[in-house]
Image: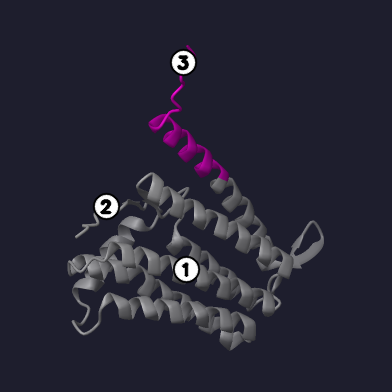
Amino acid sequence: MTTTTYTEAVRVQESVLAPLEKRCLIWMAGRMPSRVNSDHLTILAGVAMAGVGLCYWQGSPAALLGAVLLLAVNWFGDSLDGTLARVRHHERPRYGFYVDHVLDAAGTLFIIAGLALGGHMTPLVAAALLVAYYLMTIEIGLATHAVGTFKISYWKFGPTELRILLAIGTLQLLRSPQVSIGGLSVLLFDVGAVAGIVGLIATFIASAVAHTRMLYAAEPLIRVRQP
């Protein structure tokens, strides 16, 4: 019988709100009813993410307020599922890592598609943002396997901060979907998306270079001496 060993990657979470968030999540996990488990929270987070996309697509003021509420629900489920498993000592590191990332990939598609279909973001910009996000997701997954480090935040910015920024932008949509830059009227979420694309691509390049150098130093090329 073959025994499979698995070493969980080291989680690196250094965002601005991480210390406060961790204390809140542990407090909530300790008071969660026993009939609720981490799978329930994961499903809740996935459904909420899909709901956010549908709200953006519908685009009415009520739907946009619903999107903000569902972002909070997504934070609750997505952030608490892993904490609940750890507090109860019911960790499933491979299952949790895989399912969380599959749902994140699908959920991000729902949100960006909803913004584009609802007219809040130009389709081409939305597609570029999605590509940049998936490039970063691939780099994180590869680094988790090859380096043994699962980095959740970059530049003191993590998923929670992203949700807050998205919620603020959504509330701004209730006032106006456009902003003026240099006398030119452009979509608010196009501006945010372009900033996101630049940040994601820069982070992807920096991380890829750093990890490549680290792995090359750990596994240098052996030069064979010619006779």
Query: Could you tell me how far apart the alpha carbons at marks 2 and 1 are, in whole angstroms?
Result: 23 Å
Q: Quadrant of residue 29?
A: bottom left
Read off the magenta span.
Answer: 205-227
Task: Residue at 54%, 69% (x, y): give it.
Answer: 108
Residue type beneath disc 2? Thr
Q: Is residue 214 left or right of residue 199?
A: left
Residue type beneath disc 3? Arg
In the displayed structure, 122 sits above or below 152; it is: below
Q: Nearer the viewer, mark 2 or mark 1?
A: 2
Of the numbered discs in the image, which one, if any, rests on residue 7? 2
Residue type beneath disc 1? Asp
In the displayed structure, 24 sits above or below 176; it is: above
In the displayed structure, 211 sits above or below 82; it is: above
Dominant secondary structure, magenta: helix
Label 1 sits on a secondary structure element that is helix
Question: Who is closer to the viewer here, 83 or 18?
Answer: 83
Q: Is residue 182 left or right of residue 125?
A: right
Task: Residue at 32%, 67% (x, y): give it.
Answer: 95
Of the numbered discs in the image, which one, if any, rests on residue 126? none
Residue linked to disc 1 = 104
Label 2 sits on a secondary structure element that is loop
In the displayed structure, 33 sits above or below 28; it is: below
Q: Categorize mark 1 by other alpha carbons within 10 Å: few (<14), some (14-19), many (20+).
A: some
First in sequence: mark 1 vs mark 3 = 1
Label 3 sits on a secondary structure element that is loop
Q: Position of residue 46 (x, y in %)?
A: 44, 77
Query: Could you tell me how far apart the alpha carbons at marks 3 and 2 are, in whole angstroms?
Result: 37 Å
Residue linked to disc 3 = 225
Task: Check residue 215 for magenta coloring.
Answer: yes
Residue 221 is at least partly visible in this image: yes
Q: Position of residue 202 (x, y in %)?
A: 59, 46
